[in-house]
């Protein structure tokens, strides 16, 4: 359980800055080395806040009619992409807040946007299709209709993209869009993460379970018994730990040895309501969690999945998302009141 | 998958955004009704989720088109099937600062209302923010009779409804309308039935139904929860030993069932007790009795009345006693008379009418249970869990209120298939504590459900 004491309720979290956007913040991210925190909101506004001070660098309101749905930060350039209910993808320069390109993807919502790890391609999902573009916004390919609206996309490597929808995960060749491996399972897959090596595919399912596949051995497993649907999932940087929401507790499965099948997961108790978001720091075994209870927590985990809270802090409302600064020394949280809150994360409390 | 009856988080939770589901076959008038709701001055912010492209005035509300996506679960349970498109769209709607006062979901004509309704019980995030307020089903009076016969969906849309709008009544003659209304009422005794010509119904009758409020239903039809009996009328006669003539004039049917109860009391409790006994006699094969035949007490009799003119049957009484005549039709309908051997008429000491059983042509029907007394929550949970596990597929809707032992407030609940939601509402105060439950479904067994519930009483 928690090591937190009354003297230091926030543990490793030290207050940094906070800022506000006009409406419910839907998605965001740190640019490059953390120069700015970018946030898109439900009113279709996009904002950039100075990473150190929280001062507004720029704000563009109402750019996505109906609201922003997704934000993806380019892995190596000061560029990011947004998708929205208007069926468009916009490419932005992070420094000036100018859009360099607008792509009309389709008549549906653009709910997922993801850069390939090498930054050469941008994948988006719109209704039942997945589309791939070059870094310049030039269209490369488009998938056929999936059986349902695409719920998640993720790159398994610079050359391969995965999509999740009702009943299956599909892999696509990145250069030509040719569908490859299909992993099928009867159920509505609401979330998906891949291990960093692209071998393990984990999906949260509407029926309150987590399903995962090992692509190399074609072995699959289901972890059930969650009190709610596990929409929050995160792999650590080594692919050893899979943290899952789906209730008030964070459940952590360890893939070391023969696990996680037949092992007991780490159960992290702190949140008083359902966990909404999970994110591992890029290096090390630090996990950040946010919940409907409006609390952000940081956990230090062992390779077996067990661990302790080493920091926790409240925000104004339900936590939408948490984002580690790439260096792991700061953490940002977005809450339902429109707040963006940033803490310094110390090496130890 | 069944949610426990009494959950802590059900107590005093803040009011969620109400949702009305609008169903009905293509051409039943959904779009007309939708336009009507949106164009009326009600000061509410309404979001509409449409599955069919209609001609909705967009100025009045946010209209979102969503493709119907039906998501079944890996366990194969149809009661767990949800609408994935609604989860996505509503999940997004609740993130907007300019919150909506109301959400309307219009389904496609052939939609099964189950998955739509279940979405509001099954998905934890949706359930946290929204509450199913009611299901409104538009019925095309001119075509519904063919539709019920041809499509399961049509019967299910009727069975699921809290409000049935019998639309296009101007295209059908009055007798047909009465017949259609009787038929849909038989299928769904819980719903309010409204007749309209061009979906011209008041917005109040379809929004903010407070779908729980059985009291309203009872106000409209006080006999709603009374059990149905296979007989309509009882007369109690005080008889001396002797021979009596029971005579009947021409009436509406060629035969009439009758049970004579010896030693009948005159108070209501005694009448009800005998009524239950007679239900069992009525279930037995009848003795066919032709005119001038002898009639015996304690048997299910079928009096043959197809010959013209007044017909007489004879009853022998050994010792002085009261007898109760439990007749399939009222005494008036056949001008039923009991006379002594000397021709002197014997007046009934007490008469009572019963809610007569209707002919249930349709598989889909309603069961209502009403009892006084407190319920043991554990027994109720167990009974409901078992009932819904076994029959959840066939139980479309249920609602009601319950007097839980040790709870000062009424416990109100509603459910869809095997999903269940309930919470305490107003205090009982001085009102008599009682239980009222309604189930609507396919081929439900009234007797066993009634007994099952009664076994939960303390």
Image: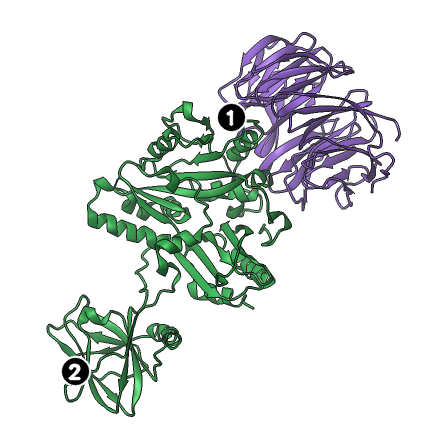
Chain colours: A purple, B green
Which residue in the structure is indicated by mark 1? A145
Q: What element carries label 2?
A: loop
Name the residue at the left extreme. Answer: B309
In the image, is A135 to the left or to the right of B106?
right
Residue B268 lies, with reference to residue B206, above or below; the image says: below
Q: Where is residue A162 in the image (x, y as percent from the top left)?
A: 63, 26
Furthest residue toward right: A348
Can see residue A275? yes
Q: Mark 2 points at which residue?
A: B292
Quadrant of the rendering where the C terminus of chain B is positioned? bottom right
Host chain of mark 1: A
* Residue A316 spot, x, y in % from top left: 69, 30
Q: How many marks?
A: 2
B267 up-or-down from A28: above or below:
below
Point out residue B194 in the picture as x, y percentages from the top left corner: 32, 45
Q: Which quadrant of the structure image shows residue A223? A: top right
Say which of A273 and A5 sits in front: A5
């Amino acid at each position: 359980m928690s090591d937190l004491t009354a003297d230091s309720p926030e543990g490793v979290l030290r207050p940094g800055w906070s800022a506000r956007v006009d409406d419910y913040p839907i998605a965001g991210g740190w640019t490059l080395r953390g120069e700015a925190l970018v946030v898109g909101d439900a009113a279709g506004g996009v904002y950039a806040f100075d990473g150190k001070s929280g001062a507004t660098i720029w704000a563009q309101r109402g750019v996505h009619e109906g609201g922003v749905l997704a934000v993806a930060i380019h892995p190596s350039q000061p560029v990011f992409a947004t998708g929205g209910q208007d069926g468009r993808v916009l490419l932005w320069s992070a420094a000036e807040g100018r859009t360099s390109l607008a792509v009309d993807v389709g008549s549906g919502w653009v709910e997922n946007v993801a850069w390939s790890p090498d930054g050469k391609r941008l994948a988006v999902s719109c209704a039942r299709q997945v589309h791939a573009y070059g870094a310049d916004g030039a269209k490369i390919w488009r998938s056929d209709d999936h059986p349902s609206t695409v719920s998640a996309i993720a790159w398994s490597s610079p050359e391969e993209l995965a999509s999740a929808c009702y009943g299956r995960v599909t892999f696509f060749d990145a250069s030509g869009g040719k569908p490859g491996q299909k992993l099928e399972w009867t159920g509505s897959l609401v979330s998906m993460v891949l291990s960093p090596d692209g071998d393990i595919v984990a999906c949260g399912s509407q029926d309150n379970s987590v399903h995962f596949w090992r692509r190399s051995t074609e072995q699959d497993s289901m972890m059930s018994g969650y009190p709610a649907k596990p929409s929050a999932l995160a792999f650590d940087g080594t692919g050893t730990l899979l943290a899952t929401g789906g209730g008030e507790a964070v459940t952590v499965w360890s893939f070391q040895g023969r696990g996680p099948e037949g092992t007991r997961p780490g159960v992290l108790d702190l949140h008083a309501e359902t966990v909404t978001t999970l994110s591992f720091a890029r290096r090390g075994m630090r996990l950040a969690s946010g919940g409907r209870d409006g609390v952000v927590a940081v956990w230090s985990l062992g390779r077996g999945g067990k661990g302790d809270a080493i920091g926790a802090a409240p925000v104004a409302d339900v936590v939408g998302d948490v984002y580690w600064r790439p260096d792991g020394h700061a953490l940002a949280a977005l809450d339902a009141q429109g707040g963006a809150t940033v803490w310094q994360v110390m090496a130890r409390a | 998958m069944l949610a426990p009856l009494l959950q802590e988080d059900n107590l005093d939770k803040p009011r969620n955004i109400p949702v009305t589901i609008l169903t009905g076959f293509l051409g039943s008038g959904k779009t007309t009704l939708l336009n009507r709701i949106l164009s009326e001055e009600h000061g509410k912010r309404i979001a509409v989720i449409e599955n069919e492209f209609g001609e909705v005035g967009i100025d009045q509300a946010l209209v979102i088109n969503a493709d119907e996506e039906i998501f079944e679960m890996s366990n194969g349970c149809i009661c767990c099937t949800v609408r994935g498109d609604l989860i996505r769209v509503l999940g997004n709607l609740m993130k907007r600062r300019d919150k909506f006062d109301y959400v309307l979901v219009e389904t496609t004509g052939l939609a099964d209302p189950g998955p739509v309704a279940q979405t509001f019980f099954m998905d934890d995030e949706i359930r946290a923010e929204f509450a199913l307020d009611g299901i409104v089903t538009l019925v095309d009076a001119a075509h519904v009779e063919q539709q019920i016969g041809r499509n399961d969906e049509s019967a299910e849309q009727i069975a699921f409804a809290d409000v049935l709008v019998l639309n296009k009544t101007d295209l059908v003659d009055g007798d047909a309308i009465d017949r259609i209304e009787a038929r849909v009422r038989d299928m769904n005794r819980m719903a309010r039935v409204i007749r309209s010509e061009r979906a011209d119904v008041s917005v109040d009758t379809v929004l903010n139904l407070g779908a729980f409020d059985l009291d309203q239903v009872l106000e409209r039809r006080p006999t709603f929860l009374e059990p149905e009996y296979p007989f309509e009328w009882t007369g109690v006669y005080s008889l001396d030993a002797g021979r009596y003539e029971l005579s009947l004039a021409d009436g509406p049917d060629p035969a009439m069932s009758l049970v004579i109860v010896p030693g009948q009391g005159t108070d209501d409790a005694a009448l009800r007790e005998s009524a239950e006994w007679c239900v069992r006699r009525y279930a037995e094969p009848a003795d066919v009795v032709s005119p001038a035949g002898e009639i015996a007490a304690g048997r299910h009799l079928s009096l043959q009345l197809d010959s013209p003119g007044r017909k007489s049957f004879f009853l022998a009484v050994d010792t002085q006693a009261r007898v109760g005549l439990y007749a399939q039709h009222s005494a008036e309908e056949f001008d039923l008379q009991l006379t002594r051997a000397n021709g002197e008429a014997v007046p009934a000491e007490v008469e009572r009418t019963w809610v007569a059983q209707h002919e249930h042509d349709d598989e889909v029907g309603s069961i209502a249970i009403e009892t006084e007394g407190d319920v043991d929550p554990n027994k109720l949970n167990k009974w409901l869990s078992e009932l819904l596990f076994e029959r959840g597929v066939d139980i479309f809707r249920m609602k009601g209120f319950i007097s839980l032992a040790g709870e000062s407030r009424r416990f109100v609940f509603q459910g869809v298939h095997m999903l269940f939601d309930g919470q305490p509402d107003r205090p009982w105060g001085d009102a008599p504590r009682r239980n009222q439950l309604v189930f609507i479904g396919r081929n439900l067994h009234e007797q066993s459900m009634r007994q099952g519930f009664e076994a939960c009483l303390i």
